[in-house]
Amino acid sequence: MIEARGERIEAGIANLAGAANLMVDIAGIRLKNPIILASGTCGYGRELAQVYDLALLGGICVKGTTLHPRQGNAPPRIAETPCGMLNSVGLQNPGVEAVIAQELPFLAAYDTAVIVNIAGHDREHYRAVAERLDQAGGFAALELNISCPNVAAGGMAFGTDPQVAAEITALVRAATRKPLIVKLSPNVTNIADIARAVEAAGADAVSLINTLQGLAIDLGQRRPVLGTITGGLSGPAIKPVALRMVWQVAQAVDIPVIGMGGITSATDALEFILAGASAVQIGAAVFRDPLLPLQIIKDMQEWLGTHGIRDVNELVGALQV
């Protein structure tokens, strides 16, 4: 059934091709449309490639990659919440060498922008991962994860202070020739300050928001549901917070903004674009509906056509306030 639905959506996208321009530019990377799969929610694309052609996407941001393999946090590490989910996966990944040898060659077969999300235990790990990927090539951009709330060291620790965020950005900037996107944490007092700091340090774009810290409790056991006690909240519940932060950051920086957080429809995606995002990432909703990114592309094309808009870029930052 899912294969048949996928074929119908793909046919709909093909029939609408040319009706409106969906191509966007992120730091010199030309995306055929603004829809990117978010890091940590699509693995390395292998499972989704069995369902539809990844080349239909604007881009795919692969799972957070570290210098050495990581097993991630002990289970339980996923908990469903009202209008969302908590996760505490802990950056489980096979390490940069395995990604270079196995995952990037697989993704190279698809005509879509591949963004590699990188994380590290400390500054040197971040630099080393970026440098090794830069040597290998085979991808469009790096996404610097300084906002993961589910690791004991690194991650969000680098993304909550403007000076520290700027320092790690500058270090990675010096280690790669690729466009550098910095992924921002919402768990801060003023996200615009962080965005301005990483822009000044050499970021080519910013993406936001990563997950909000949350807690789920098993009342019967009187214990936290997650093994790490807290986790990252994603899904529709965080959309208003994400929209507000995207709008604030878009006013504060001159570099492109990639928005994410609770997007489940073309309407959601277009709202982020109006708030100032040049592209969006789809994350938790893909767990419920793997075909959702394609549906959003098709529905976005139809909406633009219905409203007489020839270019999606006309809507970027067009929110009237």
Image: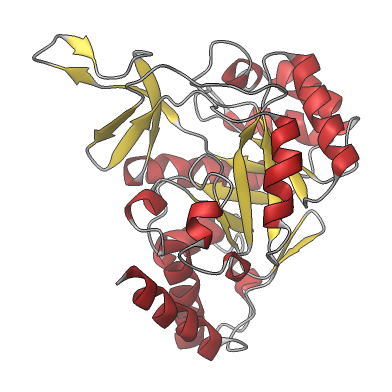
Residue 45 location (% of width, % of height): 56, 52
Q: Please name whichever residue, 214 or 192, is drawn nearer the observer in this view of the structure.
A: 214
Residue at left offset 71%, top offset 63%: 109
Query: From the viewer's perspective, is residue 2 above or below residue 38?
Result: below
Q: Please name whichever residue, 13 or 69, is drawn nearer the observer in this view of the structure.
A: 69
Residue at left offset 85%, top offset 46%: 137
Q: Determine which quarter of the picture holds residue 36.
A: bottom right
Taking the view exactly as shown, the residue that stands out farthest to the left is 220
Q: Is residue 181 visible?
A: no
Residue 42 location (% of width, % of height): 51, 48
Query: From the viewer's perspective, is residue 271 above or below residue 218?
Result: below
Specify whether 103 is left or right of 213: right
Specify whether 247 is left or right of 211: right
Q: Can residue 229 be seen in this view?
A: yes
Residue at left offset 72%, top offset 48%: 104
- Which quarter shows the N terminus? bottom left
Instruction: Report the number of numbered marks.
Output: 0
Q: Which colour scheme is used?
A: secondary structure
Query: From the viewer's perspective, is residue 167 above or below residue 251?
Result: above
Residue 313 location (% of width, % of height): 65, 70
Residue 61 location (% of width, % of height): 62, 48
Specify whether 2 is left or right of 10: left
Residue at left offset 32%, top offset 41%: 237
